[in-house]
């Protein structure tokens, strides 16, 4: 059960006045360090995969490790795709295993931001996946220096925030009140009055991007005004850089393993400090008790084909795998043929949905309807279908 619905997780944080840390995963060292800290602190945690950083690692290779870390954890975990750039990338993230996502159209005008976000929300909600939107501009480059981006700051408007949440249906809202992505000189000046007004009006979990560089008091004031998720990466990256440089100076060996020694521990130390400071430590058991487990659904069909030879059956099956695997919420498509020739049914489909909500959205999806009505059902009248979850 430790992989849980992030909407449940953040609503618990919102109701109880603490914030969950969303820490970026960019390598296995980061993944191991983050999970070690969450386990030690007994805290819920969000594993962030940031689309602008996919150039630094293979997202499809990384996701199985991230999912395994979540599934074997003893604390509640959500897997979040951050700063998504399109509907296509959102669908890919869902189908690869992310159970929450953020669409970032904040750089566009309000009307276009609403249009794109609403499209992503409709698709994600049909898969049971909550969505974070962003309104206003949090300047800087994700994970990089923000010193020269401060002029790009655009505060979130209260009036636009109310309209945006109503029109898009987002579950969480990332707001701009003075933080920046990356590093910034001096102490950021945060607009707490604006934050309080937005929180009082919306009553949904709020998100802060650019969590690095704030004081303990600033964090506490953010959390007391509705901030329930804090994104945090730059400080982790900086701590790792310092450790690698120290390893290079103090160790006779300059091998990769020598340079990377203690990296996970450095990350774990910083993450645990944040989890305790933001009030998430010790919350794991109560969050687990109030969160829905994120469990896939297996859609099973066993069937025979009528008036269709083996070669044509294989063509139909291959087309089905191609079409069905692209539908939002479909994790895997498995097809099989009976080992014994005298069994009652000769063929099977096993389509894995990420969430029970996909049962309905998959059934009604145009691609599924076209394949089923035109290619499958006319030749597979003798069939049994069932949806099930593991117990």
Image (cartoon, rainbow, N blue to C red):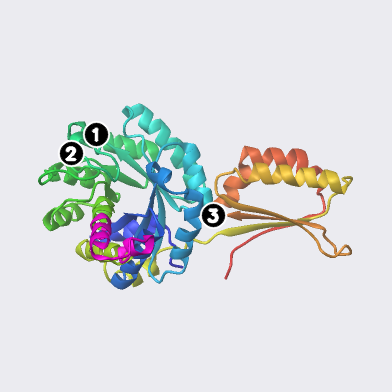
x, y percent for residue 148:
19, 35
x, y percent for residue 132:
36, 45
Alpha carbons under labels 2 and 3: distance apart? 41 Å
The answer to whether 74 appears left or right of 389 in the picture is: left
For this rendering, which residue is in front, 243 or 22?
Answer: 243
Observer able to see residue 18: no
For this rendering, which residue is in front, 12 or 174?
Answer: 174
Circle 1 crowding by C-alpha within 10 Å: few under 14, some 14–19, many from 20: few
The answer to whether 180 appears left or right of 69 in the picture is: left
Residue segment shown in magenta: 240-263
- Residue 338, image quadrant: bottom right
x, y percent for residue 14:
27, 57
Q: Which residue is mark 1?
A: 159
CB atoms at circles 1 and 3 under 8 Å apart?
A: no
CB atoms at circles 2 and 3 under 8 Å apart?
A: no
- Residue 75, image quadrant: bottom left
For this rendering, which residue is in front, 127 or 324?
Answer: 324
Is label 2 in a helix, a strand or a loop?
A: helix
- Residue 223, image quadrant: bottom left
Q: Residue 5 shows which numbered tag?
A: none
Is label 1 in a helix, a strand or a loop?
A: helix
Q: Which residue is mark 2?
A: 147
* Residue 259 forms part of the magenta stretch: yes
- Above or below, 7 against 284 in this view is above
Circle 3 crowding by C-alpha within 10 Å: few under 14, some 14–19, many from 20: many
Identity of the residue drawn at 26% across and 54% down: 241
* Residue 51 forms part of the magenta stretch: no
Q: Which residue is mark 3?
A: 354
CB atoms at circles 2 and 1 under 8 Å apart?
A: no
The answer to whether 351 appears left or right of 67 in the picture is: right
Is label 3 in a helix, a strand or a loop?
A: loop
Q: Earlier in the sequence, mark 2 or mark 1?
A: 2
């Amino acid at each position: 059960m430790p992989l849980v619905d992030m909407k449940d997780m953040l609503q618990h944080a919102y109701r109880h006045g603490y914030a969950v840390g969303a820490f970026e995963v960019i390598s296995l060292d980061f993944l191991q360090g983050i999970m070690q800290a969450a386990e030690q602190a007994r805290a819920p945690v969000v594993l962030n995969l940031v689309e602008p950083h996919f150039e630094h690692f293979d997202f499809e290779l990384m996701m199985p490790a991230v999912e395994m870390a979540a599934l074997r954890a003893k604390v509640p975990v959500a897997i979040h795709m951050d700063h998504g750039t399109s509907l296509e990338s959102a669908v890919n993230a869902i189908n690869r295993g992310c159970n929450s996502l953020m669409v970032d159209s904040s750089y566009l005008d309000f009307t276009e931001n609403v249009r794109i976000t609403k499209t992503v929300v409709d698709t994600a909600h049909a898969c049971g996946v909550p969505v974070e939107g962003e309104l206003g501009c949090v300047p800087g480059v994700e994970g990089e220096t923000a010193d020269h981006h401060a002029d790009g700051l655009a505060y979130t408007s209260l009036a636009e925030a109310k309209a945006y949440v109503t029109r898009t249906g987002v579950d969480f809202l990332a707001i701009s009140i003075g933080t920046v992505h990356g590093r910034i000189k001096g102490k950021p000046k945060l607009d707490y009055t604006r934050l309080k007004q937005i929180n009082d009006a919306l009553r949904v979990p709020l998100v802060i991007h650019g969590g690095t560089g704030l004081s303990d008091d600033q964090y506490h004031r953010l959390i007391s005004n509705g901030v329930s998720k804090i994104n945090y990466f730059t400080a982790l990256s900086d701590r790792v850089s310092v450790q690698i440089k120290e390893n290079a100076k103090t160790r006779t060996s300059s091998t990769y393993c020598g340079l990377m020694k203690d990296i996970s521990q450095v990350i774990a130390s910083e993450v645990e400090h944040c989890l305790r400071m933001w009030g998430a430590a010790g919350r794991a058991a109560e969050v687990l008790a109030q969160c829905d487990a994120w469990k896939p659904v297996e859609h099973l069909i066993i069937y025979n084909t009528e008036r269709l030879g083996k070669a044509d059956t294989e063509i139909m099956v291959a087309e089905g795998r191609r079409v069905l695997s692209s539908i939002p919420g479909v994790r895997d498509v498995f097809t099989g043929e009976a080992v014994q020739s005298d069994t009652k049914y000769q063929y099977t489909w096993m389509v894995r949905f990420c969430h029970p909500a996909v049962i309905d959205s998959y059934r009604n999806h145009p691609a599924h309807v076209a394949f089923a009505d035109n290619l499958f059902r006319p030749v597979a009248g003798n069939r049994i279908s069932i949806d099930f979850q593991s117990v």
